[in-house]
Image (cartoon, rainbow, N blue to C red):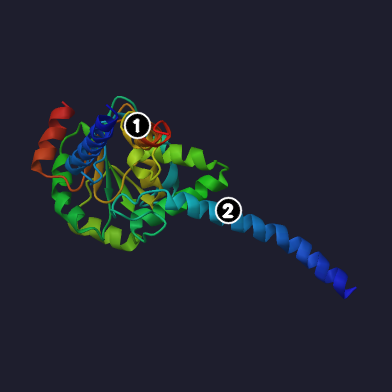
Amino acid sequence: MKFLKFFLIVIILFPLSSVNAEENDKRNKITKNLRCLICQGQSVYDSDSEFANSLKIVVDKKLQEGLSEDQIYEYFKTKYGEWILYDPGLNKNTYILWLLPILIFLIGGAIIYKSFIVKK
Amino acid sequence: MKNKILPFSVIIIFGIIFFIFYKGLEDSKIYIPDVNAKKEIPVFNTKEFFSRENVKSSSIFELNKFYLLNIWSSWCVPCRQEHSFLMNLNLENKLNIIGMNYKDNLKNAENFLKELGNPYKEIFIDLDGTIAIEWGAYGVPESFLIYNNEIIKKYIGPLNQDLVDEINLLIK
């Protein structure tokens, strides 16, 4: 009987705590990817400024409203511009950033191919 | 031929990297908000400052009128400096000044208005700073010039005589 009670308690508590933890993880992940605009070089997650604290509340609210991570990023992008995101998307200002590694990789690969494999 | 490709491509790659870093040096790393972008004003619910009654944003802002939304706080020192300019702007009948009390102790805020005067036609409360974020604001003081539910211009930091002149020109 005791075991049954214990079992019931575990069953009741377990899903709740995991949902909570999941939401916390998500919130931390999102706030780590948002730049605190008035404290340069810190993410919203790291900062304790008035601005960052309000932003954390807004992120919580949006998560409760059921918005996805990308929708929340999009929301802040329309309010503050691309600069607020640490992980910028591909557009005309950032294409060099995205394409350069691929370009260097290809050129490097070509050099290696030319100088080592063709030589043999 | 083979020997020439290697140094040539190395030079090109370093050239590209140099160019990117050089360009990066010139860019400002400080966040400069887009102050001229026309944006629709957000919709929100809040409380009125004096009566503490619920108000909707749609009942505050009407069409065909100029509004200046001013975000202020009694703990904010630059807000004290700009207050006299707001009082002067208040003399213009064309402009309705709306106050947003940002993360403030309401008692202190009332004393602030008693001491320096109340230029605001209406004041609403933003206790946790979330409404300011809806507006895309990032601190106090900040002012938004609004016409037809659109933000015409954003003023970050305290207002001064030059900006007051500019506002007077814009609302003519």
Does dot 2 land on a helix, a strand or a loop?
helix
Q: How many marks?
A: 2
> Is A73 placed above or below A10 here?
above
Q: Amino acid at mark 2?
A: Glu
Q: Are marks 2 and 1 on the same chain?
A: yes
Q: Earlier in the sequence, mark 2 or mark 1?
A: 2
Q: Circle 1 is placed at which residue position?
A: A95
Residue for point 18% across, 43% down = B25
Does dot 1 land on a helix, a strand or a loop?
helix
Quadrant location, the N terminus of chain B: top left
Chain identifier of the residue bearing label 2 in the image: A
Find residue A83 and report its image quarter.
Answer: top left
Q: Nearer the viewer, residue A99 or B52?
A: A99
Quadrant location, the C terminus of chain B: top left
From the viewer's perspective, tell me whether residue A64 is left or right of residue B132. Answer: right
Chain identifier of the residue bearing label 1 in the image: A
Residue B17 seen in the current view: yes
Q: Circle 2 is placed at which residue position?
A: A23
Contact between labelled residues 1 and 2, with CB atoms less than 8 Å apart: no
Q: Amino acid at mark 1?
A: Tyr
Q: Position of residue B118 (x, y in %)?
A: 23, 50
Residue lying furthest bottom: A2
Label 2 Cα crowd, 10 Å radius (few <14 / some 14-19 / many 20+):
some
Residue lying furthest front: A120
Residue for point 37% across, 50% down = B125
Label 1 Cα crowd, 10 Å radius (few <14 / some 14-19 / many 20+):
few
| Alpha carbons under labels 2 and 1: distance apart | 33 Å
> Is B52 placed above or below A82 here?
below
